[in-house]
Image (cartoon, grey):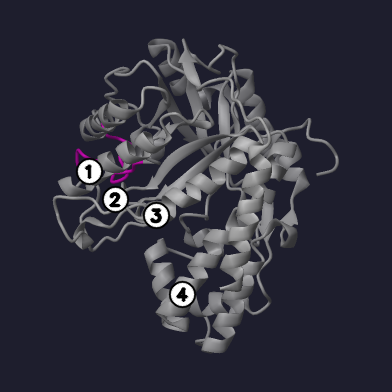
Amino acid sequence: MKFHSARRISLAVAGVLLASISFAAEGFLRTQGDRIVTGTGHPILLRGMGLGGWMLQEGYMLRLKGENPQHRIRSRIVELIGPEATERFYILWRDRHMTEADVRALARAQFNSIRLPMHYNLFTLPVDEEPDPNRHTWLPTGFEMIDRLLTWCRAYRIYLILDLHAAPGGQGHDVNICDRDTNKPSLWEDARNQAKTVALWRKLAERYAQEPWIGGYDLINEPNWSFEGRERHGREDQTNAPLWKLYQEITRAIREVDTNHLIILGGNGWGNNYRGFPGPWDSNMVLSFHKYWNPNTDETIAPYLALREKYRLPIWLGESGENSNEWFRECVALMERHHIGWAWWPHKKVASSSCVYTVQPPAEYQQLLEYWNGNGPRPTRETALRVLFTLTENLHPDRCHYNEAVVKALIPAFPATQ
């Protein structure tokens, strides 16, 4: 109770202080030909950071091996410390993983945007848990997390891009990135999951329709599903018709309540397969692609440059990272030479130096990893409690290691001190 009371007081004080500052944006981001511009028509190159691990945990970011979607991570924690302590762990994880200090550090480093990977289950129930199958139950947690982050983004003049990273049912065979439970129908196998996806976007758009610091809506992260019986992740599909159909349904729902914000699409095959794209169906649309572990040459981005030229739509590197600082510098230079904005991945990760903040795990964390990875005995409940709750304390940027070299690789003009 002390923690929650202190947090409420802190947020209230912050709200009073922030309310005294002018947060006027230059209107809503929009497209102008093949560029993204501010509401006043000034071109803007988005330099962003993706908040992987906050709303949605991925096993590798915790140093787990193999397939570890979040629901499996959670069940492993429950097995060690019980359901009540697990719920407390996740409350603290969400409270401490992303703070005003994190946003302030990004602003000081001259990032101008944040991409927020959202898990649908913080906003609504899974379809098989709905008490009334004809209605959607809305949960406050996810909306409150966005509102809190948006307050900080507004204060530090950073655009917030909403990204549905885990769609109802899961949007692909890469289960880690979308928390898919393979024992249940996927997004593409159950019309109820698709209806809930559409309804969630309409709800978000209705809530943030008049908010200029919301930069846009990234509809579905990295779909990877073959609709044609080809390579299972959809990299070889030729039409991708169900994907374009669902995107159009989401767009219509958004436009019923919000005509202001960018609509951002990603292709199949982890976001990059645009075969069958029917052309823009909205006047404020951006095409996203993702880039990992390939050369930083014009040839590697040629398909997306061709899409931009053909359709006169802006393109955006919605996700990249997980490499060396030299590769980071080369990739950013390539993007900016072609007037392409970008969002890096991720902001914060356990025991990794390829992000802005390295979360330092407790010494005994290795015992949990060895047990979870099948290489060691089961730790005691007391050890697991101590390790997991210390880990949540270590999420705060003051207790993380700040990787200034990463920031300098992304934004070379970054000043020498934070």
Q: Which mark is on residue 140?
A: 3
Q: Amino acid at mark 2?
A: Pro
Question: Which residue was labeled with disc 1?
Answer: 194
Q: Residue 33 at what x, y percent from top left?
A: 46, 10
Q: Residue 339 at what x, y percent from top left?
A: 59, 18
Q: CA distance from mark 2 to mark 4?
A: 23 Å
Identify the magenta region.
223-237
Question: Which residue was labeled with disc 2?
Answer: 168
Q: Amino acid at mark 3?
A: Pro
Q: Residue 222 at what x, y percent from top left?
A: 39, 41
Residue found 69% across the figure and 37% down from its top: 107
Q: Is residue 292 shown left or right of residue 67?
A: right
Q: Amino acid at mark 1?
A: Gln
Dominant secondary structure of the residues highlighted in magenta in the image: loop
- Between 180 and 148, the one lying in front of the other is 148
Element at badge 2?
A: loop
For the residues bearing labels 1 and 2, Cβ distance under 8 angstroms: yes
